[in-house]
Amino acid sequence: MSSLYGKKIRIAIFGQSHSAAIGVSIDGLPAGIKIDIAELRAFLRRRAPGQSELATARAENDMPEILSGLVNNITCGAPLAMIIRNTDVRSADYSEVRDTPRPSHADYTAHIKFGGHQDVAGSGHFSGRLTPPLCAAGGICLQILRDIGVFVGAHILRIGDAGDDPFNPIYISSADFEAIRDNPLPVLRREAGEAMRQQIQDARDKGDSVGGVIECAAIGLPAGLGDPIFDGIENRVAAIVFGIPAVKGIEFGSGFAGAARRGSENNDGLYMDGGAVRTRTNNSGGILGGITNGMPVVFRAAIKPTPSIGLKQESVSLSGAENTMIQVQGRHDPCIVPRAVPCVEAAAAIALYDAWLDR
Ligand SMILES: Cc1cc2nc3c(=O)[nH]c(=O)nc-3n(C[C@H](O)[C@H](O)[C@H](O)COP(=O)(O)O)c2cc1C
């Protein structure tokens, strides 16, 4: 099933952009865990539109209603189900894309897959609107991980031509995550954020969009999580991160850059640090053979430019079987990257907590 994820906890995400609600159920959470609802809401607010003028004008408050699974805010062992109501919908904006697919959106592939029965309103099940349930589940996993000493955080590494400094993959502290968390453009170097803002504004002013890269790290994970071959930490993280619409690539550690190096440059030398085994560098991104080695887990996700742009583009009329042009209507983010940062953190937290339960 496409909307299910996890081995020890099973999350199921449902809804469409303009359906009555979107939601998630999380099965398998251990009983007896206290969930801080205010903290969960604060986490969801980071993804919601309206945090800055750089995001879509769609106004959604993204506050989850918890239907089951908690008694006095403590997990009770039953599946934890949450919904988020869709309130600000303008379905008329999408009537054209049923016959004329937007370039690089899922309109054409959904049409083929679902034989014309797909919900096109607001991009239906393919919308970024399906990420609040992911963030709701991830926000809970982030809290549980924090309570066992595992912290996950992400920043924007690049938007268009504007780049931030990467995390130091050897020493990352939870304070590094806290310092950037509430910034609508979370970056390690303040000037990088200003340059990124200009990239987004420039794209928006031209009716265009821009993509970028999010770097995510997890610290405090013990060595030994994950399994070889198909169930490694890389596999598990990649599977859920690709569930975030617009993610088109992922790399761990030195990733593609490492592929151009000699082994002598890319190998992470080992040493004893007190009683612990550490590595001098972390080109492996904290994972070897699919299994954590106790160093920070570090990965980067490539986010493509928002497909819906205001410029005229080539498309086809499916009914007329002829070429045509499309100019996309509706309210769209000129850049998905800032709002995808908590989505990446949430996805990583779900994957890592699931792997932790599976240890
Ligand atoms: C938070 C978020 C917001 C998004 N907003 C938009 C949007 O406003 N307009 C748009 O065309 N795509 C948006 N997307 C991306 C599309 O949903 C995505 O590109 C599309 O479903 C095709 O999937 P793919 O790019 O993963 O192949 C958004 C994605 C995310 C994660």
Image: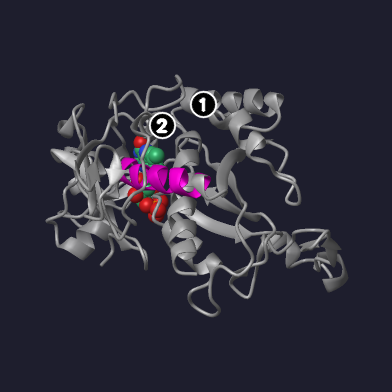
Q: Amino acid at mark 2?
A: Glu
Image position, residue 162 (x, y; %): 66, 34
Whether residue 105 appears in this view of the structure is no
State whether the magenta stretch is mostly helix, strand or loop. helix
Magenta stretch encompasses residue 279: no
Q: Quadrant of residue 256?
A: bottom right
User: In this orientation, which residue lies closer to the viewer: 37 or 100?
Assistant: 37
Give the residue displayed 58% in from the left and 47% down from the top.
216
| Pointers 1 and 2 in contact (C-beta within 8 Å) | no
Give the residue displayed 46% in from the left and 45% down from the top.
142
Q: Earlier in the sequence, mark 1 or mark 2?
A: 2
Q: Which residue is the extreme one toward the right?
A: 264
Q: Residues within 10 Å of mark 2 (few under 14, many from 20)?
A: few
Image position, residue 170 (x, y; %): 76, 51
**Ligand 1: which quarter?**
top left
Q: Amino acid at mark 1?
A: Pro
- Quadrant showing the N terminus: bottom left
Q: Which residue is mark 1?
A: 184
